Amino acid sequence: MKLWQNVNVEFYHTAMKHYSSLLLFLFLLLSAARCQAELPDSFTASYALYYDDLKIGVMERRFINQGKTGTFESNGKLTGLAALFRKDRIAESSRWEVHEGQLRPLEYRFVRTGGKREKKEYHHFDWYQKKIVSRTQDGEKILQAKPGVLDKLLYQLAMMELKDPENGLKFDLVDGTTLKTYTFKFVGREKIKTPMGKLETLKFVRVWPESVEHKRSSTLWTAPSLHHLPVRVDNTDNKGHLTKIVIKDLEGL
């Protein structure tokens, strides 16, 4: 029991963020243009969350496609022994639309409760005035709503429209009260084991800006047979701890 009491709560926050981070980093954009016909049908994907090879939680992603509009939701929580000591829960939602063939966010919400570090984040995308109203505990900021900007959930849907993986991946998104660019390079094809069986995947690693000093690493795998759905994400923090998220169930694709 003492082991769980000593586990740094950062492992959970980092895991949820990066498959928000499914998952940050999680999954990127090749092009700003999004065609309605290219979007997948509605689906639900469930994932197991690990910290240094210990299974400590679950996450569920639900995509609802209503044609020109829809929602993308994510809910995560601790389970098993970890849940005896912490009640952390994370809920995210993105409301989106297809406008002139382009996928774009309308409203994004993030809520983390049950722990010592509760957090709320909200973004309203006003495409007519070309601005984004971003609110966090630290205050409010107005950002420019340039074409192609996505939120921390919607960029993962954009990943599923992958056309040429060898060119790598790049996307712009709103994170907190800032606009950030994430870049991943394609490193090859790999067959990986999952609770759903062995899957043929494409493997990507994150390319960090030269100006950022860190010891972190992020690697993700997508499955072409599942509409390029992210099926595994590994994140190593500055202290060398590994957070891993692996798909365990899928309905709808």
Image: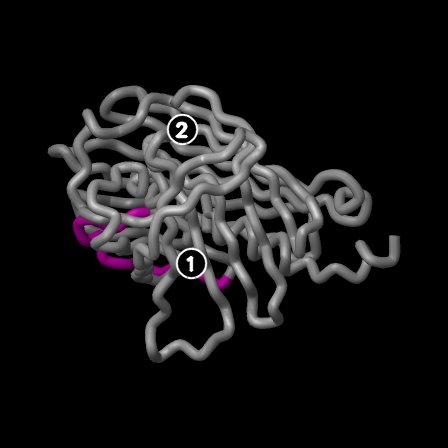
Mark with earlier residue (2, 1):
2
Asked which quadrant contains residue 79, the reply is top right
Element on which disc 1 rests: loop
Q: Which of 50 and 20 is in front in this view?
A: 50
Answer whether residue 123 is visible to the viewer in this image. Answer: no
Q: Does the magenta stretch include residue 145?
A: yes
x then y, percent, for residue 219: 44, 56
Identify the residue at the far left of this view.
Answer: 100
**Secondary structure beneath label 2:** strand
Q: For this rendering, which residue is in front, 63 or 89? A: 63
In the displayed structure, 198 sits above or below 147; it is above
Q: In the rendering, at what x and y percent does residue 146 appear?
A: 19, 53
Q: From this viewpoint, is residue 12 visible?
A: yes
> Which residue position is annotated with label 1?
176
Residue in the picture at 41% in, 50% down? 26
User: Picture coordinates of residue 50 (x, y %)?
Assistant: 64, 48
Apparent side of residue 243 relative to residue 55 in the rendered image (left or right): left
Magenta-highlighted residues: 138-150
Q: In this view, does 53 lie to the left or right of 1?
A: left
In the rendered structure, does residue 117 fall within the stretch colored magenta? Answer: no
Q: Where is residue 156 in the image (x, y as percent from the top left)?
A: 36, 43
Q: Which mark is residue 63?
A: 2
